[in-house]
Image: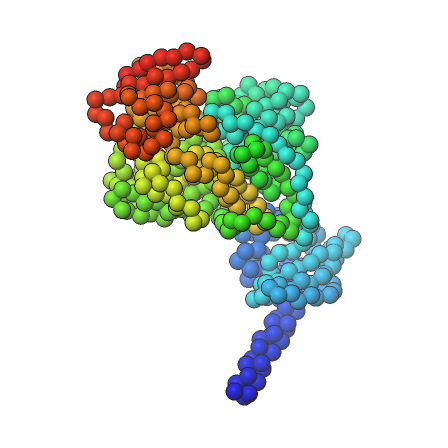
Amino acid sequence: MKKGLLLSMLFISFIINAQKSSVPKALKAFELSFQQKDYNAIKTLLAPEFTVGVGDSSSNEFYLTGIFKAFPVLDSMQIGKSTAMKKETRVAVHFFFKGKEKRPAEIVFNKENKILYVTFFDALYKVDRNAEVKKLASIPFEMLENGIAIKIKLNKSDREFVMLFDTGADGMALNPDSAHKAGVVVTNNKSAAVVGGSQQVQYSADNTIYIGNQIIKNQGLVIFPKSGAFDGLFGANLLRNYITKVNFDTKTIDLYNFGNFVYEGKVKPLVFDYKTGLPVVKMNLTFSDNKKAEGNFAIDTGASYDLIAYGPFNHKHNLQASLKTEYTSTNFSLGHQTQIVCGAIPNVGINGNNFPNVTIALQEYQEENKNWASADGSLGIDLIKRFNFTIDLLHKTVYLEPNKSFAKLSSFYVSGLDLDFDEKNNLIVTRVLDTKKDELKNVKTGAKVIQINDFEAKDLLNPANIKKVKENTAGNDLIIEQAGQSMRISL
């Protein structure tokens, strides 16, 4: 027994000494690679989770080669104090560049002696992983056309612009009239990704956003056609600059600086993928024929669905064969159109949360345009707003906290309308799906449904009654109230 214990202690001692000896070797290799500006050599020293600032690991080459170009040759790297901790080793260093002052930094290794991050690289992108996290601003918002509406100012204009906060947007967009009023100067044309493909758009660099007491400079934007009541949209502009907390109960967005963020809530963290420039999480779908499909879905507050599955994912799993189609329509994404079929599925699971009877839209598959999608679909606003959520882009983590709407019924489709209960259990038209029906041409988003057939709105809080309405083959009579007037329509 004693002999076994001694051997065990000797083995642990050997491992510790091996780890200690490999750190200096890694530092020497890092110094040489940095001097030679050799990304491929540095890459072998990096941990899988290594990033520069809030970037993704898939962008390491872009960031590091950019740093190599921006700085003169590294003359030497002076190594200082090394501090071993439970899961990492921190080494103080000084970088000496030819003709430049020395730059202090820390190189942090994981327990496998791979580099987790370099504080000098992070600082170039205004990120301090060890900083104390503090609230910087609290921005009020309202729900407008089932989207998160935030007021901002742009450039030197005194006008307030109503923007859709869209976490599914990796940049910023303005409609032409708002761009003119904001003094936006077009610098070139670019290809922009939209649902179903891409399109050429006008691009403007070096714009400034004023939001609350915060200023975000050097922002690019594209010019898209007018969309609803919004002047434009943005999402990544916040996520790349702040830990962003959205609270649907208080209708506020709180912004925090990046740093040593300690989550104080009770829900478990959900790590997301960010290699496409959007937060993408795993979700599990169950269809009525018991078909199950796991996919990677973007957290997309700009998608006015519970869930949309893109064409390639639909095709791969043959989802359309498992969905009872309740209507067909066209999805519009900043001017780009794709056909969709919609229905409801028995269950959607995300991070241990399960939601029954969730509406889903399946996008058509196009063989000639099969490689456009960077994710399998989008998790839309109707599911997202059941949570107050915090996105920490530095650590690629989102926290989904159930809010007052967590247990509410899912939205549902009836006769070409998408209906949902609001916080006061009013039944509201969230979208007019069948725009070709004459009876629906005068129905507006936000209209209140008072009655369907013999069921008052409150009766439809019972899912069994919703099922009866859906199964009514004779059609449905609705009483709708909008703009202070009531109207009866038959569908």
Q: Say which residue appears at 66% left-offset and 69% top-offset.
A: 24
Whole-percent x, y for residue 300 in the image:
47, 37
Whole-percent x, y for residue 91 in the image:
69, 63
Q: Say which residue appears at 30% left-offset and 45% top-offset.
A: 317
Q: Is residue 139 left or right of residue 193?
A: right
Q: Residue furthest left?
A: 474
Q: Say which residue appears at 55% left-offset and 37% top-offset.
A: 246
Q: Is residue 165 above or below residue 273?
A: above
Q: Visible in this render: residue 69?
A: no
Which image quarter is the C terminus in? top left
Looking at the rendered structure, the number of numbered marks drawn on it comes to 0
Q: Say which residue appears at 55% left-offset and 60% top-offset.
A: 47
- In this rendered view, identify the residue nearer to me: 343 or 88: 343
Q: Is residue 367 left or right of residue 104?
A: left
Whole-percent x, y for residue 219 in the image:
61, 34
Q: Visible in this render: residue 473?
A: yes
Q: Is residue 365 above or below residue 351?
A: above
The image quadrant of residue 184 is top right
